Image (spheres, helix red, strand yellow):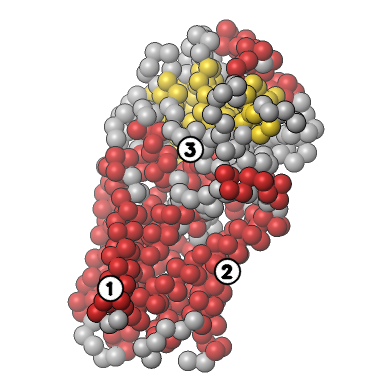
Amino acid sequence: MSFIKKLLLSIFSGVLLSIAWPVDGFYALIFIAWIPLLMLEKSLSDKGKTSVAFIGYSLISMLVWNVLTTWWIKNASFGGALMAIIANSVLMAVVLYLFHFVKVKKGEKIGYVALVALWMSFEYVHLRWDITWPWLNLGNVFANQIEIIQWYEYTGAFGGTLWVLAVNILLFQVLIKKAEGVNIRPLLIWLIAVMVLPIALSLIIYSTYKENLNPLNVVAVQPNIDPYNEKFSGLTSAQQLVKLLEITNGKIDQKTDFLVAPETALVEYIWEDKMNESDDLKTLDSLLYKFPNLNILIGASTLKAFLPGEKISSTARKFGRTNQFYDSYNTALQLDRTGNIQTYHKSKLVPGVEKMPWPAVFKYIEKFAIDLGGISGSLGMQEEREAFFTANKKFAAGPIVCYESVYGEYVSEYVLKGANFLAIITNDGWWGDTPGYRQHLKYASLRAIETRRSIVRSANTGITATINQRGEIENKTSWWKEDAIKATININNKLTFYTRFGDYLGVLAICITLVIGLSLIIKRNIINP
């Protein structure tokens, strides 16, 4: 196979992956998108030797995919986009080269098992380490096609990743075996079963799933404050709060259970040990006096000072040249008429803008952090998820701040803490009118299916909406428009299989990867020293 043909195959895979991606993609292409790259790999491994060239071709393919799908990051920062795209592409290319290496050393069958296991292991790790960027995890590709992935309540998005890779490998094998004149009937049966059965199961679940009537009345506001020119400089926090409340005027009534307002709706910088001194919180108290049954879930910028002798976090900052420290948080607050204020600190932080990776190690080079859009500098976080309970314990919100909604098992932890509905508060205007904010909205549908929790989503800019337990988006606002929605959603207290067991498919993939790796080490050092 000529260099030009290999190059075109690598580019073609990247293009197909991109065209399949939501929100405007043709998802069916994902089931053939890996085949050009598999053809390329086969041509390089037929000689029975590993080829370093495959990592180069893989890198080209992954760069094409990453660039065409996440180019919109550049609207927040060109440097940030460059770093994120290159780093993600390199990691993916390394994973693909490891598959090639195993396939050459262990044979075709083990090789393709390794491809699935290695890729799913990569996705599992990519959801958890400090340079996390799981936007392109393969299971996310079906965010537009919720009718065919209702079984995510059992597998999570990892089931989608497994499905994509399995179909691509089986279809590739059918094509290869047919060209070799081998009987392909058994492979065809497997291919059809793997393609059709998940869709059929999903359609049955989709058509039969009914929400139990357990209503929660919500108002979600979209103040539409420009994140660049108004949010953190042009308007005071008091002005922004007045605007927010004006938009909700006429929407909130005595039956409203929750007002949900977006990420960093309050930019006053509230000291957590002096919340009673906050002017913004006093303004919200007046609303609670008017509507005693109301709960307010709202985003805020908060600060915590460490007391003398208290353990200092790895993200703590100094008060000037003193020996006193404090943490800064991207926080969700819940207020009610009792005066009880519940807090949750965003803990899945955007690498390079809200968090310097491995802060204990790289804290002192934090000033070189990239800007992906958000609040600069390493923010504090908390170890455990938090559910916000109303005073009567009837309702419990899972307060999900922005980027956290991309993480399946992470979101399920709110449910395990007692959340019977999910509240996503976000600010999606950093990237402009691009696929970024629309993809972010669609990914929330996956979380609704996985947990079978209704979602109320409040975006400062982007799209504010409710999402039902089947993942259907309802009551949505328009892009870049001041608005508020008034809706009724149903709460749910039942736990799905996925909520109980999380990303077990990712754990299984890691176990398989370790077994394959161990067998290679044993073969090299013991059997064939």
**Residue, disc 1:** 522
Q: Residue at x 50, y 70 (%)?
A: 93
In which quadrant of the rendered image does the C terminus lie?
bottom left
Residue 343 placement (x, y as % from top left): 52, 24
Q: Is residue 316 left or right of residue 238?
A: left
Q: Is residue 18 left or right of residue 418?
A: right
* Label located before the other in sequence (2 or 1): 2
Residue nearest the observer in this picture, 131 or 488: 131
Q: Is residue 239 above or below residue 227?
A: above
Secondary structure category for the residue under label 3: strand
Task: Tell me the crowding category of disc 1: few under 14, some 14 to 19, or many 20 or more residues within 10 angstroms, Cα based.
Answer: few
| In this view, the mark in front (2 or 3) | 2
Q: Is residue 329 above or below residue 192?
A: above
As drawn, which residue projects farthest toward the right?
A: 234
* Label located before the other in sequence (3 or 1): 3
**Residue, disc 3:** 474
Instruction: Check whether the beta carbons of the residues at disc 2 and disc 1 lie within 8 A of each other.
Output: no
Amino acid type, residue under disc 3 in the picture: Glu
Real-space Cα distance between discs 3 and 1?
Answer: 55 Å
Q: Which mark is residue 226?
A: none
